[in-house]
Image (cartoon, rainbow, N blue to C red):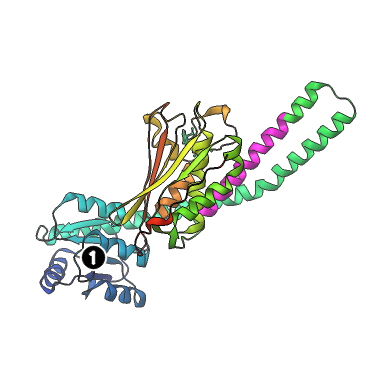
Amino acid sequence: MEFPRPIQVLLVEDSRDHAVFFTAALGKGFKHTHEVTVVESLSEGFAELSSGHYDLIVLDLGLPESQGLDTLKTFFRAMGPANPVIVLTANSDEGIGEESLRLGAIDFLTKGEFGADQLSRTVRYGLERWRQRRELEEAQRNLKSFAHVAAHDLKSPVKSIGLYASLLKQKAASRDADEEEIEFIEYIESFTEQAEKLVDSLLNFSVLGEKSVELGTVEVSAIAGQAVSNLSALVEEESATVEVGELPLVQADEGLLVHVLQNLISNAIKYRGEEPPLVKVAAMVRGSEVEIAVQDNGRGIDAKYFSRIFEPFKRLSGPTHPEGVGLGLAICQRVVEAHRGRIWVESEQGRGSVFRFTLPMAEASVRPSLGVHCQLG
Ligand code: ADP
């Protein structure tokens, strides 16, 4: 990998000895011209990053104001995912390294276990991986804006086809056309309706990709209530019961979270079994994250489809549910991942499903008395 100018490295490390060792090892092993700036705390790091440009951040997880993976989470919360971060940990626990990568770091090093050569390799490969990640993101952005333009431009002709089909139907009915003719026109109407839904979902999907996440402290119970109320027609039609348990406060984008809960609750109702749908929304605090669960008593999902259903346009339900286009869960995944959370499903065919996702917990503590119970239909 070629660098046109000296590489600027920001080392956030409160131990002088480790900072000296790191700088010397980098000087010895890493052949590209580089400059290392050392700061001793996260707040100093944030100040440096807001005033200057850095090509690489090396972040010690044990700092005066925070310890362990919380340091990395705080860093990403404050700075977003715009910087390549290599994590330094005093703990040789592989789990911490893997979790750091999952949170967005490009690599990790265990103190006392690396020398000049390994450090140099980690930095070179890490920066190369970062470059590739940026290229991929750029390609995805281009693809998304293409999808957006295509969906946007399709909207109007599809609407017109629907309009002309219904005019045609009116004319056909007024001149006593035969049944088959009317039936064909109705097919056009119904396929046009599907195409309109697809175009709208595509637009939603591509807009979500562009929208930046505006984090705030959010009451999940209020958001769940809002999602249920948006779905009141479906809830009533299917005689569904939606129970919302005690839910903590999270750090999330309110509008996007409504979207996620609405998609999951509506799926829980749509993919029902024999019994009237019973949906339970619950949450539990796990460390600095909140895990939210949407549980149903519906038809369930075969384990072999657990990851595939989150891919765009993947549907298992076939023609019995023409209202879906297979983008709902892909949108949920995109939103949850934009919050640095995870989403997954646990299910057994014929025995219902639980969709779980994680979000960062709000700084404010849990407010236990906020649970509401919505029973519609
Ligand atoms: P859509 O609902 O538009 O088909 P989704 O992306 O929301 O798209 O869901 C993808 C597929 O996952 C659905 O077609 C359905 O087969 C399956 N699915 C989603 N949620 C559930 C659920 N709660 N129970 C059973 N199957 C589900």
Split into 4 quadrants, where in the image is the N terminus? bottom left
**Residue found 31% across the figure and 76% down from its top:** 48
Residue 303 seen from this side: yes
- Residue 307 drawn in magenta: no
What's the magenta region?
A: 187-208
**Residue found 79% across the figure and 36% down from its top:** 166
In the picture shown, does residue 32 fall above or below 160? Answer: below
Question: Label 1 neighbourhood size at 10 Å, few (<14), some (14-19), many (20+)?
Answer: many
Query: Which x, y percent locates residue 91?
Result: 14, 57
Q: Relative to the observer, which residue lies in front, 331 or 134?
A: 331
Q: Amino acid at mark 1?
A: Leu
Looking at the magenta stretch, what is its main secondary structure? helix
Query: Which x, y percent locates residue 355?
Result: 41, 41
**Residue found 27% across the figure and 76% down from its top:** 44
Query: Which x, y percent locates residue 128?
Result: 30, 56
Mark 1 residue CB less than 8 A from any atom of ligand 1: no
- Residue 204 drawn in magenta: yes
Residue 313 seen from this side: no
Query: Which x, y percent locates residue 225?
Result: 51, 51
Q: Relative to the observer, which residue lies in front, 102 or 342?
A: 342
Quarter-wise, where is residue 88 in the image? bottom left
The residue at which mark 1 appears reads as 59
Secondary structure category for the residue under label 1:
strand
In the image: residue 22, left or right of residue 217: left
Quarter-wise, where is residue 55 in the image? bottom left
In the picture shown, does residue 17 fall above or below 373? Answer: below
Q: Relative to the observer, which residue lies in front, 210 or 41?
A: 41
Quarter-wise, where is residue 215 in the image? bottom left
